[in-house]
Image (cartoon, helix red, strand yellow):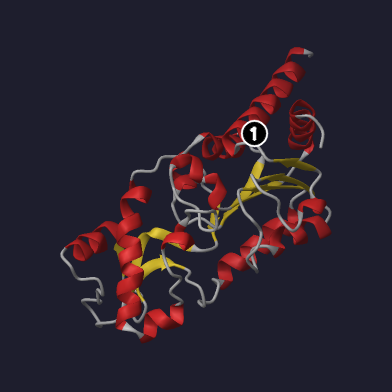
Amino acid sequence: MDSYFQRIKQAVNLLQEAERITAFTGAGISTESGISDFRSPGGVWDRFRIVTFQEFLASHDARVEYWKMKKELFYEMKDARPNKAHLALAELEKMGKLDCLITQNIDGLHQDAGNTSVIELHGTNRKAICVKCGKLWPIEEIQTVLETGNLDPCCDVCNGFIKPATISFGQSMPEKEMLKTYACALRCNLFLMIGSSLQVEPAASIPREAKRAGAELIFINLTETPWDHFASVIFRESAGQVLGEMVEGVKELISNSHKSY
């Protein structure tokens, strides 16, 4: 692997030359904001059992187990703030470089940072939804209910089960968001993948589609992925550090080009 400086220089050049950039983010971008990821040692799946969507619908005990997890993680997400990586992606959008941002995350930190073109593949943890009639609540209202001891809340309109407005294991991916995602991947000429292990389909197929359509790929992830061989540049360093330096590098190139006139 080339030196860090060489990789930053190459990434900055790719950013500067790209006309349409798509970013794809996973849990790894939010760990620097204090939010647990899922697969790392000590992560969410180490501490809690996966409750599938089918189990949630079929079993009171499964819903209680699920909501215990959500209740415990509530303040971790509520108190989290965007980190340098989120802010760098928001800066790329302000500069007119970022065409769209696809995220597997449910924390809303990209929007807090200032990104407006965000596709949430796995929904949002900031709202809760009735699985029967579709009524929505701010998640804070449901947390208040959970803290009274009711760990299987039901809708006040139709008595359906309430769950966070996220996509659970076994639940169908949102069709509209998936169509938008593939459209973004296929039209970009630079694809940034940040903080995803790329182990879960169909999300893992998105960088592959961008590559097949001719895009250059930059991967920023602490660990290897099955698709590293597709990437033009790979970083194992902190996402905040790397993205921050990449954006500053592009700004410097733009500034120098203006001075030359």
The three-letter code of the residue at mark 1 reads Val
In this picture, residue 216 sits left or right of residue 139: right
Q: Residue at x 57, y 69 (%)?
A: 176
Give the percent coordinates (x, y) of residue 131: 37, 78
Q: Residue at x 40, y 59 (%)?
A: 125
Q: Residue at x 79, y 13 (%)?
A: 260
Q: Closer to the camera, 57 or 119?
A: 57
Q: Secondary structure at mark 1?
A: helix
Give the percent coordinates (x, y) of residue 66: 36, 70
How would you rate the neighbour count of disc 1 (Cα within 10 Å): few for under 14, some for 14-19, many for 20 or more?
many
In this picture, residue 252 sits left or right of residue 94: right
Can residue 117 be seen? no
Give the percent coordinates (x, y) of residue 30: 50, 46
Q: Residue at x 77, y 52 (%)?
A: 228
Which quarter of the image is occupied by the C terminus? top right
Residue at which label 1 appears: 242
